[in-house]
Amino acid sequence: MATTILVQQAGRFLQAGRLVAARATIAALRRGPADGTTIDEIEARLCMAEGNLPGALALLDGAIVRLPASAGLHLLRAEARAQSDDHLGAVADAAEAVLLAPDNARAKAMLGLTLIELDRPEDAIACLRDAVRAAPGLAAAWQGLAEALGRAGDEDASQAVHDAAILNVAQHAGLRVAAMMQAMRRGDFARVVGLAVAARQAGLADACIFGLHGHALSKLDRHAEAAGIYQDALRLAPEDPYVRHLVQAAGLLPQDDRAPPDYLAAVFDGYAGRFEQHLIGLGYRGPLVIRDALVAQLEEAGGSLGEVLDLGCGTGLVGVLISDLPMAGIMGVDISEKMIAQARDKRIYEELIVADIPAYLAGTQRQWDSVIAGDVFCYFGALGETFAAVSRKMRAGGVFVLTLEQDEGAGGRGWRLGSQGRYVHDPAYVMGCLEAAGFTVAVRRDETLRLEAGAAVRGMVIVARKAVLHG
């Protein structure tokens, strides 16, 4: 009886997030006669909560050897493997859990979610449909089904699933955020506003919902309304980087000199699956502009770009377009792990690094002959320090090609944060920063980089060379 009480108490501590108390209770259980497999399962859950995935997997491996027919153990190991990015292993365990417990909706949901990670959306859809039919209150299954349908190219069906999910799990803020994000990607800002208003009417006070509401209002040029919504978001989450960046873009807080790294990682991790499709729909020309600029510089570069660094490589759009040019190899850096995963699938880059650009440049000893940055510096206001860091990592005579959004004057500092959350720059300011960093500007040309709400986004492409020291 005492053992059962301790097991239940450990579970309650875990659910409440009281990890130290849970650890002490598990230690007490280890000293008693409790079943070792039960303790291993509880401790594995604790290890996962602590972020100790290797420890969790070691415990679950042993437990499954002793009890191989346990669907619950296989399901838990699938979760641990998925968190460890072992998606093949996660699929194997989730499939085993489904075989052992065919009516277990959570097992079917887990199998569907892991199949999405293996880029098998059609297979995932079947599992996730079964899961939501069996357990209409399972939020993760609804969200996964909408994601799988979107990845399969059926955005209308994905939207319908979002609507059904909200009806079935009305108080789940994450489902409403996912529906709003999908509508944002589709450019349906009126739907975003409608979803946000409905969430508020349902009694949900969530900073991310409010932030997306304000962002959509800004996209609809309803800036005064957006300002009030942003203030609500800021009161709920005053330190949230996503919220603060959007509030700064609305002019309600002093503007930082760059977008917060956490904001960029969150935005682009959520955007990775549809990034390329969305940009193509906007008539995005950045990669082509960069390719043309590099081709024009090849002769002066001796017929080869040498070793190339792609800053903010994203899903590898620029890398794909320049991969046929003569070079000694290309490396990519991006803050979004999920964008990097998309780039890795293209098998173009010799190396890909998940890192914030200034931090990576400060920490590496490598040097490159060519550096490219396609639509990266729209997330940086002040450019001087970053340009200097790029210069230090380039060999003499190397070429630096970048695109930026432009606005003469740009708020008096040479840059300002626009209402859409991106920075625009005065060309004269950019030229000055490049020259101060030791570059000679060879080309500066005005370009239309993409469309925004049907209007051309004014940009520029710049080709700069690192000065060659003489004497």
Image (cartoon, rainbow, N blue to C red):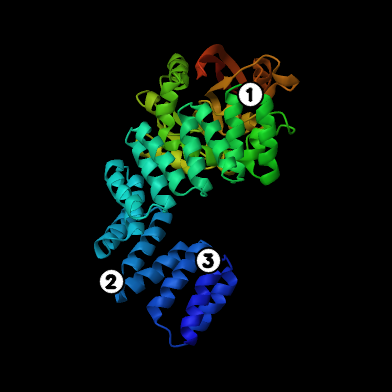
* Residue at disc 1, secondary structure: loop
Amino acid bearing label 1:
Arg
Residue at 46% across / 49% down in the picture? 169
Amino acid bearing label 3:
Gln
Asked whether the viewer can see residue 436, the reply is no
Height in image: 77 above or below 228?
below
**Cβ–Cβ below 8 Å for labels 1 and 2?**
no
How far from the left and from the top, in percent, is residue 362?
61, 41
Amino acid bearing label 2:
Pro
* Residue at disc 3, secondary structure: helix
Which mark is first along the chain, 2 or 1? 2
Q: Name the residue under label 2.
A: 68
Which mark is first along the chain, 3 or 1? 3
Q: Residues within 10 Å of mark 1 (few under 14, many from 20)?
A: few
Height in image: 132 above or below 146?
below
Residue at 43% across / 55% down in the picture? 83
What's the mark number on residue 15? 3
Outermost residue, top direction? Answer: 446
